[in-house]
Amino acid sequence: MPKKEKFELEFLFKTSPKVLDNMISTPSGLSEWFADDVNIKDEIYTFIWDDSEEEARLITKKLNSKVKFKWIEDEDEGLDTYFEIRYEVDPMTKAVLLTVTDFAEPDETEEVQRLWDSQINQLKRTLGA
């Protein structure tokens, strides 16, 4: 299996950090933009899209800062990968800079980045940001 490569994407938001925190770290928030449905049991989040399911372990959850997950499939394969959504508020403009860090196989990087663009645009629409 080819090694997955790390990438980062940045997005600007005009929204409250408290609202954004709820959208990126709770099953109800994530199911509004990231997946069709999200369930949680013992720090394992199950993301459901159409007819597929993926499980991820919650690695880090820091209020008003970030959330970090590791796909169970990658964990089982011993891969040192994760996906993280973190954000910070610019003290001058009050705009929120959201950064997504993820990993993808080299031949899938563009596709995964387009998927994130689409998902984050859905998040912006949901928030009206």
Image: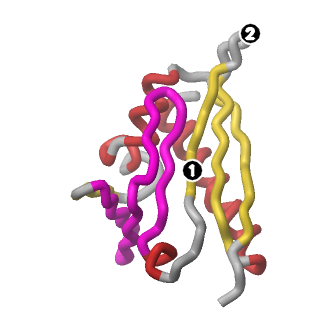
Residue 124 horizontal side relative to residue 111, left or right:
left
| Residue 108: % across, % down | 71, 76
- x%, y% of residue 27? 32, 48
Q: How far apart are marks 2 and 1 (CA)?
A: 25 Å
Q: Which residue matches tag 2?
A: 92
Across and down, in percent, residue 79 comes to 57, 75
In the rendered image, residue 69 lying in the magenta stretch gets the answer: yes
Considering the whole magenta stretch, tell me its main secondary structure: strand
Give the answer, above or below, for where 59 lies relative to 25: below
* Residue 105, quarter of picture: bottom right
| Extreme-left residue of the structure | 41
Q: Position of residue 20 (x, y in %)?
A: 48, 31
Q: What residue type is labelled 2?
A: Met
Point out the image quarter for the C terminus: top right
Q: In this view, does 80 lie to the left or right of 104?
A: left
Highlighted range, magenta: 43-72
Circle 1 sits on which residue? 84
